[in-house]
Image (spheres, coloured by chain):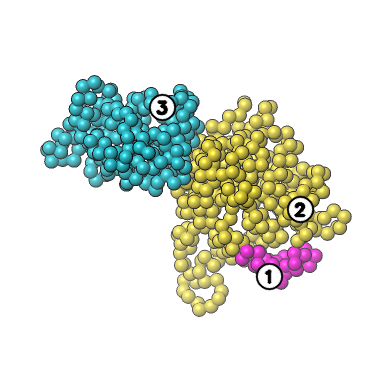
Chain colours: A yellow, B cyan
Amino acid sequence: MTEPNPESSVGLVTPSIEHFEQAIELDCGVTLDAYDICFETYGTLNAARDNAVLVCHALSGDHHAAGYHSPEDRKPGWWDNCIGPGKPIDTDRFFVVCPNNLGGCGGSTGPLAVRPGTGKRFGPDFPIVTVRDWVASQARLADRLGIDTWAAVIGGSLGGMQVLQWAIDFPARVRHAVVIAAAPRLSTQNIAFNEIARQAIRSDPNFHDGHYYEHDVVPEHGLKLARMVGHITYLSDDVLHTKFGRELRAGKINFGFGVEFEIESYLRYQGESFVGRFDANTYLLMTKSLDYFDPAQAHDGDLTRAVSGCKARFLVVSFSSDWRFSPARSREIVRALLDCDRDVSYVDIESDLGHDSFLLPIPQYHKVLASYFRRIEVQA
Amino acid sequence: MNPAVLRPEHRLIADWIADGARVLDLGCGDGAFLAELQRDKGVSGYGIEIDPDNIVACIERGVNVIQANLDQGLSGFDEDSFDYVVMTQTVQAMRFPHLLLDEILRIGREGIVTFPNMGHWKCRLQFARGRMPVTRHLPQTWYDTPNIHMCTLDDFEDLCASRDIAVIERAIVDSQHRAVIGMQLLPNLLAEIAIYRIRQRR
């Protein structure tokens, strides 16, 4: 167990749930009559209510961004290295809100939730949700919490896409938009990888067209494969080489199909540990949400026009070895913002850790975030 | 680059910049100059910088900074999108200074470029002794200097002429960044730093 460090940790946290009886019409045309949003908060909302920061999670993330749920927890929340007292997102100054997205499996309404009036889980019948839907639901959560304007909205990867969507959909409600390791839309290659992940899950005999809960099974094998292929895209070739090289577990080649290379063992471990904590139907939904994200689409593919109404100041961050959402993809966002004279800073962090860098405490990265957040004005 | 050394030179440049202008500062260092222009002249704009520490310094000052390698061009910027593109003591460290000058005048209505003058008598003296010059403004030795494309005032003006670039204004200063009157007679010999305001002839 990692001892929670009281100096720099938000400590023990308890998730909250807000229930919404307000129907929400989703992009796909389906209306959800009611839903829950599960979220965590760290720090204190000040009297002026101008110090709230929204943290948007990525594909496999959830609302548990910082701190510990119990003293026995082995690991803190997924972005604990960045959120806490004295950390880049300083909870001594900011009130941080991190919700689990609709369609998720962390406590917000999603495929695991029981469908009203049926007694059965939504499963595969949970509607496909988009980044816009998430932002709309997060805006309602903000209303509920009495937050009119976010001091900042921040997120990496799919989280960064939500930040961009926030700045576009609610320009008056975002003062600072921090878009990390994101892209204005997926490349063909990105969609191709997602499709492999989906096919892995859907072709698992235990998937049962998504109704696996009723059969008391989990499409373990497919979800594991999906995570394995995803994981490769999160890391760089260099870091795989440095970490695992061509090391053999048994020290020699065995001319078989068991685990031989260390990388095989690592990927299997990553896949297996994911199966225990993530729902396959949610994984399918999240990859679709990624595929559909394209804020420029409503403007004839013109990203500049899409962001022209944004009022937020932007910080865009990429990582040099990220090939999932490469620096060039971040520069597309920067260019669109420059084209319409928005305030924007852009930093490309030197890192050989690939897309995963956005979750890691890389010194230059955290220096940039800390400096940026120190500049954000909030009342005492 | 030492901002304390650059300050007087920047003051001279600031006089050329109109209030409320849009400014792009290439190689903006720690962002001090842009921050000053924002405060005193109400300009808006961006700095371009490649050094990680300088980028953090810019962010700390609240200056918009874009991390980019100037040697890779400025294709992220549209034609005539700035009133002024400023580049102080950076042109001599570029791989293709002539191409960058074209870029500056593509995206800016005017360019303001400064560089250390290789024609200064102190440099000439060292050349005469058979040595590459090492001066207060060019402290590095030949093998570790970032300044790979040194020129004199006359060289720079020749380049401008060959690329249809008009010199609107020229200021020359000595090591204390004072503009000395006598310098106008023998600029190429007496100027340590040259400051040019240029525009593309169209």
On the question of residue B164 being in view, the answer is yes
The C terminus of chain A is located in which quarter?
A: top right
Magenta stretch, main secondary structure, is helix
Q: Residue at x 24, y 46 (%)?
A: B143
Left or right, A19 with reference to A360? right
Residue pointed to by mark 2: A29
Outermost residue to the top: B181
Q: Are marks 2 and 1 in contact (CB under 8 Å)?
A: no
Q: Nearer the viewer, mark 3 or mark 2?
A: 3
Residue pointed to by mark 1: A203
User: Which sits earlier in the primary sequence, circle 2 or circle 1?
Assistant: 2
Residue pointed to by mark 3: B17
Outermost residue to the left: B129
In the displayed structure, B63 sits above or below B144; it is above
Q: As rendered, which of A70 and A263 lies closer to the eye?
A: A263
In the displayed structure, A138 sits above or below B86; it is below
Q: Which of marks 2 and 1 is in front?
A: 2
Q: Are marks 3 and 2 in contact (CB under 8 Å)?
A: no
The three-letter code of the residue at mark 3 reads Ile
Q: Which residue is drawn at 49% across and 58% down?
A: A236
| Residue under disc 2 on the same chain as residue under disc 1 | yes
Mark 1 → mark 3, Cα distance in angstroms = 65 Å
Chain part drawn in magenta: A195-224
